[in-house]
Image: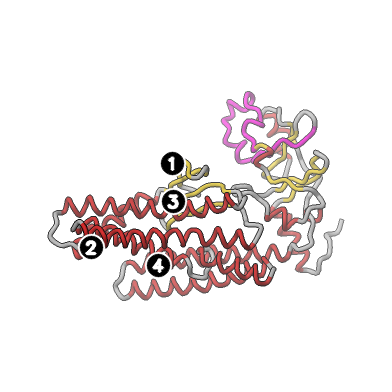
Amino acid sequence: MNGSVPIGRVVGVPLRMHWSVPLLVVLFAYGLGRQTLPVWTPGRSNAVYTLASVAGALLLMGSLLLHETAHAATARRSKISVEDVTLWALGGLTRMGRPQTARAAFAVAVSGPLTSLVIGGAAVGSGIGVDALLGWAVPAAVLVWLGWANLFLGVFNLLPASPLDGGRVLQALLWWRTGDRDRADRAASRSGQVMGVLLAALGWVSFLRGSSGGLWLVAIGLFITLVAGAERQRAVLQTGLRGVRVADAMSGPVATGADWLSVRRFIEEVAGVSRHSVLPLLDFDGRPSGVVHVRGLARIPRARRDEVRVREVATPLERCAVAAPDELLGGALDALRPGTGLPLLVVDADRLVGIVTAKDVTRLMERQALGGGREPG
């Protein structure tokens, strides 16, 4: 996610934090220290409220991290690749590959909300116990607040609307019941679009009635609507690609370059005459070794272009999307690892025979919409 920085690892997965997280901590701490705690436990000093509210906000962020960690850990147990976990203003985001079974999809989706519900119940119970046994009113209030926040998070995430966890649960159940993954994806994303619009409308009405928190609900509703719309387009694409093989969509011959060339020579001999913005590289034996982005070449200072080899600024083959010509295109796109996108390198017997770009896929879909005819020539 743009604007995020790495801060460590969790369950073997890179952990990132978006710049909006400190702002979120400040907002939570402000609301807890200036509104909630003075009402629940009146008569304490500002220093007590400030310390308790900061601790509560940090604990809430920790519980959000546990929510996402549950997704990542369950995905890895289900043999699903996980790119990273990112904390940001709307909670968290775990980037992972697509589950290959409905059972795995259900397990990954439900793990996060269940974790939040367990944390919420434990925090509320602990808060009640601390108050009853020790009489520590402020720590007890922070724990109860933390518990209710997690309970709300767990229940809200179970709403049947993609990209919320509840939408993933709905998709998994429909997939299991119908055996049609694409149909389940379309239904869950449509539910997400409807729910997003309703949440945005509810938030706007709340804001007009004087609640500033309504704007937060509007933002969440719009986010859900936009992401659900993108997921619906992807589901429609998968349906349209049924039975289509990689060779049907690939473009070729492909402009390639030797990976040992200097950046200057590669620009002059290959990039400068190619129509593609991503170009495959070949090693000494003529086998594909990776791809290089033209925009990456442009960032190399002119004074260094003679000394830098193009392979030094390329994406190596192990991080590229690769498929065989007779492979189903939908399956090849479905198997893309998180963080790996098009173009798709088409390799046959260790030789590059073509590539599939986003434009190639779009052109293929347009031809099918016209009746499935092939382009002339």
Give the mark nearest the N terminus, 4 or 3: 3
- What is the crowding at mark 3: few (fewer than 14 residues within 10 Å), some, or many (at least 20)? many
Q: What label sits on residue 240 in the rendered view?
A: none
Whether residue 34 can be seen here: no
Q: Nearer the viewer, residue 18 or 137?
A: 137
Give the mark nearest the N terminus, 2 or 1: 1
Circle 4 residue: 217
Please tell me whether mark 4 or mark 1 is closer to you in this view. Answer: 1
Callout 3: helix, strand or loop?
Answer: strand
Give above or below for 187 relative to 96.
below
Callout 2: helix, strand or loop?
Answer: helix
Q: Is 236 left or right of 228, judged from the image as shown?
A: right
Q: Which residue lies furthest to the right in this view?
A: 377
> Disc 3 residue type?
Leu
Give the mark nearest the N terminus, 4 or 1: 1
> Disc 4 residue type?
Leu
Q: List x then y, in percent, for residue 38.
A: 18, 62
Q: Nearer the viewer, residue 337 or 215?
A: 337
- What is the crowding at mark 1: few (fewer than 14 residues within 10 Å), some, or many (at least 20)? few
What residue is shown at x 49% (from left), y 72% (from top)? 195
Circle 3 residue: 87
Q: What label sits on residue 7 in the rendered view?
A: 1
- The magenta stretch is 286-315
Q: Are marks 2 and 1 in contact (CB under 8 Å)?
A: no
Give the mark nearest the N terminus, 3 or 2: 2
CA gap between label 4 and label 3 equals 18 Å
Q: What label sits on residue 35 in the rendered view?
A: 2
Q: Quadrant of the C terminus?
A: bottom right
